[in-house]
Amino acid sequence: SIIGYSLCSSTMLLANKLAIEFVPSPSAISFVQILFSTITVLTLRATGYSSIDWFEWGKMRAYSYYIIIFVVTIYCNMKALEASNVETVIVFRACSPVAVSFTEYFFMDRELPNTRSALALGIVAFGAVAYCLSDSQLALNGLSSYSWVLLYFFLITLEMTYGKKLISAVKMESVWGPVLYCNALSVLPMFVMGMGESNFISELLRLPELSGPGLAIVLFSCVTGTLIG
């Protein structure tokens, strides 16, 4: 599962970066991906593939706070990819376990990393600092060039910590249950957030007119996003 998630996550970063080149609206791409994942899980449930949890008010209420973080994190991820290169986003995402380890210690009663784990996390952090110091974008524009990716770093730390707590507290019959809840409940918030972009609706309407490579990239990002769940 860890290997599969890592492959999908890193691949999706590249796919999203390419998708933005064809569809210059981060919200439009994210909205389509979330809608695609929702339809996929609903189709699996309708065909009887798996015993997938249906909507229950108690579970929906528990997921409501997480959905807000989830949607904003996705939006910031796309904006970070739009403003920075893929390597920068990967480096900051790779550093998130350092922040998560402290967040879990203070808010989830987890132990701090042992010496071996702390050394491994320290190496990751050192690599991130070394990368930033050699990044021409940072040298040219200062920390302002990292505004979106820093916000993304903060939010993904919060999302992973809260998400782990949520999955432990809200029991689902199938692994597809959380995927359905996260995506289905995020469709409307992502659409509302997208309305803040002047070209959101126009880019959604333009999707069927994309070239073959453009459609393939967007579809590939949708499939990968579903597999990440």
Image (cartoon, helix red, strand yellow):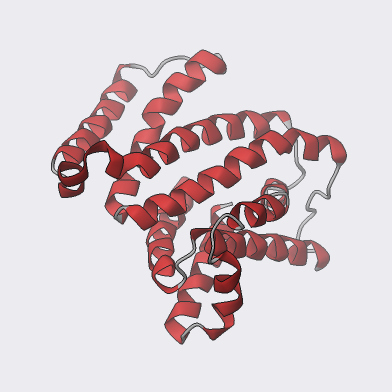
Write the residue at 26% across / 26% down: 122
Write the residue at 26% across / 37% down: 143
Write the residue at 86% across / 42% down: 56
Task: State the image coordinates of residue 207 (x, y, percent, origin top left).
Answer: 56, 77
Asked if residue 1 shows in the view, the reply is no
Taking the image as shown, residue 132 lies to the left or right of residue 13, namely left
Q: Give the residue furthest to the right.
A: 57
In the rendered image, the vertical position of residue 214 relative to residue 157, given as above or below: below
Front residue of 51 and 67: 67
Asked if residue 212 shows in the view, the reply is yes
Task: State the image coordinates of residue 222 (x, y, percent, origin top left).
Answer: 55, 65
In the rendered image, the vertical position of residue 73 relative to residue 43, given as above or below: above
Q: Quadrant of residue 49?
A: bottom right
Write the residue at 59% across / 38% down: 69
Q: Give the residue furthest to the front.
A: 198
Taking the image as shown, residue 77 lies to the left or right of residue 205, namely left
In the rendered image, the vertical position of residue 142 relative to residue 121, given as above or below: below
Front residue of 193 and 119: 193
Task: State the image coordinates of residue 46 (x, y, percent, origin top left).
Answer: 82, 66
User: How many numbered circles are shown?
Assistant: 0
Task: State the image coordinates of residue 194 (x, y, percent, origin top left).
Answer: 59, 57
Front residue of 57 and 136: 136
